[in-house]
Image: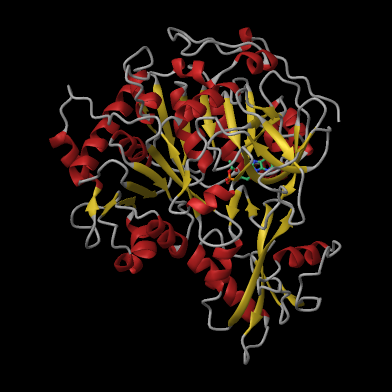
Amino acid sequence: MADLALQRSVGERRPIEHVPALAPLIGDYDHRRRTFSWERARHWLDIDGAGRLNMAHEAVDRHAAGPLADVVAIRFLEKAGPTFELTYAELKHQSDLTAAALRRLGVLPHDVVCTLLPRMPELYLTVLGTLKAGGVYCPLFPAFGPEPVRERLALGRARVLVTDRLSYTRKVEPHRAELPNLEHVIITDSDERGCPRGTIPWSRLLMGGAAAYHPKENVVAPTWPSDPALLHFTSGTTGKPKGAVHVHEAILAHHVTAEFALDLRPGDIYWCTADPGWVTGTSYGILGPLSCGVTVVTDSADFDARRWYRILQDERITVFYTAPTALRMLMRSGADLAREFSFPALRHVVSVGEPLNPEAVVWGLEAFGMPVHDTWWQTETGAIMVSNFPGMPVRPGSMGRPVPGVDVAVLAQGDDGRAAVVDGRVQVLTGPDEVGELALRPGWPSMFRAYLDDPDRYARAFADGWYLTGDLARIDADGYVWFIGRADDVIKSAGHLIGPFEVESALMEHPAVAEVGVIGKPDPLAGEIVKAFVTLKVGHEPTPALARELISFGRHRLGSVAPREIAFDQALPHTRSGKVMRRLLKARELGLPEGDLSTVETPSTQPAGDAAGEGSS
Ligand code: 6R9
């Protein structure tokens, strides 16, 4: 498909009054790629003479001390009721108080503080307050059920959790005894009397902060670039969720990529629709954009096409970062609806998380007057690594070109689909459009520095000086990267990674279930939905009623990552080592050739009785 040239001159940007640019405007992509270095970019931040930096200082405090002090940093929209705003100066002050309060509570450097909250002020203050206190912030996705919440609190050894009353009583209290590290639970929506036993109201936390806070003192912990700052759980194909650890200097990559790929600069009014429970919601919902000095708009309501268009129009959003599922939902609501609104302020529309169909790119032209720009990255990379940059011709269907300062390659695959590592060496494919595993040369600041408590797994993520992404891709003759698929069994549903193992383990707890294999089934809206193939224990019948029961059982325990479809299969295919072959289940589901079956033990059988469950449309 032809390139969609998107050429805009700097002069077309919305004028910014009284606000100097914080980082120099740099020319076009090729120029940036030639001249950019992470080392030089460090000067764009406010790093102290000894080399220490703190994410929250870089994101907020340095603006609070300058010409952006009275600019709105975050504007909170709510479904009903008035909106609430915090300027950079106010955000600095409130997050100082939160940091002082957490410290007074006993939070020490490197302690893990979690949130289980919708997008509300207390969430943002906890993120910034934790970073200022030198703690490690770990978001939990509010749509998670009790099981994923318990597992992540336990794996992260969280000391503090900030949540609301209902989430606490439903998802945490039943497991509290199994979480010995969880010393303090802060409840945002209750006063002293309304708080469940063993929890503290937010108001009391802040009173402690006010008592401990001296405005002349800098409460920001003097953290080093390599001190841990963020813990993000992500899903692998086997075993427990992986805790990707990011360090304070990641803010440099958040900042640079927010500027290069999202085109953010002071004066922008920016909306990122991702929840901070997902890495996009922290890197580009909080840290990157604030570090660029923009006004971040955040909305706590569920998706509603009309409401979204209204926000884009009425808030005069200039840059919009969202995900393909959301774009497909907007597309589905029809072009007529889009035409009821106008978006004269909008300058740049960006997407991440799943393959962005070319139709969605082109639809952007119709609905917004500009193509949607894809970006690719992962929890592990911490920041955008590949992007269709503003001003660069967009190739619909391609993820774009590497961020300046980032080197990508595709590596020759072995039998298992992953990069073949022979005697510690990999083979870089040099021809254009050769398909292999996408790999990145380490060296960008937001690269994860560990999988929590799992150094072996971390080591396995690298080979021969490359970080192996687990994605398959090709790179065309002009350096544009095209996504082919994942090299593993991890499911991407509505942009969110789901580990099949976590889903299987939860379903296994149902008394009727003997064994489960879980796959991602293609879905026109969500990209993929979770489908579970279940073998029943003797004495249980594969009825539609049981399928529905399993779906609700899964939903109750897992929340948003639960399977949407159940199929009963009394002869799941296994490898010789006894693992359910998800790859084969998926091939059958898709009607694809079953590939190399030399390692299958159970003979090929068709799934018995596809019992689609409720809500599987
Ligand atoms: C930020 C984020 C990472 C995985 C990644 C890939 C998929 C992300 C994509 C994309 C096609 C894109 N992915 N962006 N696939 N096109 N533009 O998504 O992090 O949740 O860790 O997922 O998402 O498979 O490896 P995370």
Is any part of residue 309 visible from this angle? no
Instruction: Identify the residue shown where x is 76% and y is 48%.
Output: 413
Colour pattern of the rendering: secondary structure
Q: Is residue 509 above or below residue 371?
A: below
Give left or right: position of 436 versus 24.
right
Residue 343 pos. (x, y %): 63, 25
Residue 437 pos. (x, y %): 72, 44
Is any part of residue 307 visible from this angle? yes
Quadrant of the frame with the N terminus: top right
Quadrant of the frame with the C terminus: bottom right
Give left or right: position of 133 versus 609.
left
Residue 205 pos. (x, y %): 21, 44
Where is residue 319, by image quadrant? top right
Q: Is residue 561 above or below residue 379?
A: below
Where is residue 440, by image quadrant? top right
Q: Is residue 536 above or below residue 613?
A: below
Ligand 1 position by quadrant: top right
Residue 481 pos. (x, y %): 74, 33
